[in-house]
Amino acid sequence: MKGETVNRYLPLIITGVLLNAGAQVFIKNGMLQIGYFSFKIQNVIPVGFKVAANISILSGVACYVVSLIVWLMVLSRVEVSYAYPLLSIGYIVAAFAGKLIFGETIDLIRWAGILIICIGVYLITKSAS
């Protein structure tokens, strides 16, 4: 596939990635509302009901469903060796969302990792040119 053809699907890929990262943020928010729980058989039903009734978690699941539909569209149009590595953009989005929304700490090592991911994503998109 020529680079111009592949790169024209970049907005579709980014949409799928953002939906997937958004799902993570919604689910994290929902689990903050539910709180810590032990993996015990007696928790399956009460925690299951809390999860099933939590609007943040339901929003996260909805984002996953739409993201899957978008990803099916992506894979029908571009090579998986091009598209799949671009999912790593979600790591970047999730890290920034964790910092901005949840006040998580991102130390220098994590910033370095994010920078390396950014360089990798750049190289992948350039390889299609």
Image (spheres, rainbow, N blue to C red):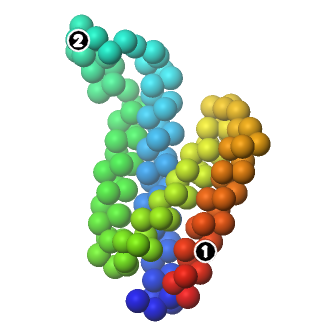
Whether residue 96 is situated above or below residue 126 in the rendered picture? above
Q: How many numbered dots are placed on residues in this image? A: 2
As drawn, the residue found furthest toward the right would be: 108
- Residue 38 x/y as whole percent: 37, 12
- In the rendered image, which quarter contains the N terminus? bottom left
Q: Which mark is residue 103?
A: none
Q: Name the one closer to the observer, 3 or 110.
A: 110
- Residue 90 x/y as whole percent: 52, 53
Q: Is residue 79 left or right of residue 35?
A: left
Q: Name the one closer to the observer, 34 or 105.
A: 105
Q: Is residue 14 in view from this perspective? A: yes
Q: Residue at x 45, y 25 (%)?
A: 31
Q: Residue at x 47, y 64 (%)?
A: 85
Q: Is residue 9 left or right of residue 115?
A: left
Q: Dot 2 lies on which element?
A: helix
Q: Is residue 8 in view from this perspective? A: no
Badge 1: residue crowd in 10 Å (few <14, some 14–19, many ≥20): few
Q: Which mark is residue 123?
A: 1
As drawn, the residue found furthest toward the top would be: 42
Q: Which residue is mark 2?
A: 41
Q: Dot 1 lies on which element?
A: helix
Give the number of the mark in front: 1 or 2.
Answer: 1
Whether residue 71 is situated above or below residue 97 in the rendered picture? below
First along the sequence among labels 1 and 2: 2
Marks 1 and 2 sit apart, C-alpha to C-alpha, by 47 Å
Q: What kind of residue is marked 2?
A: Ile
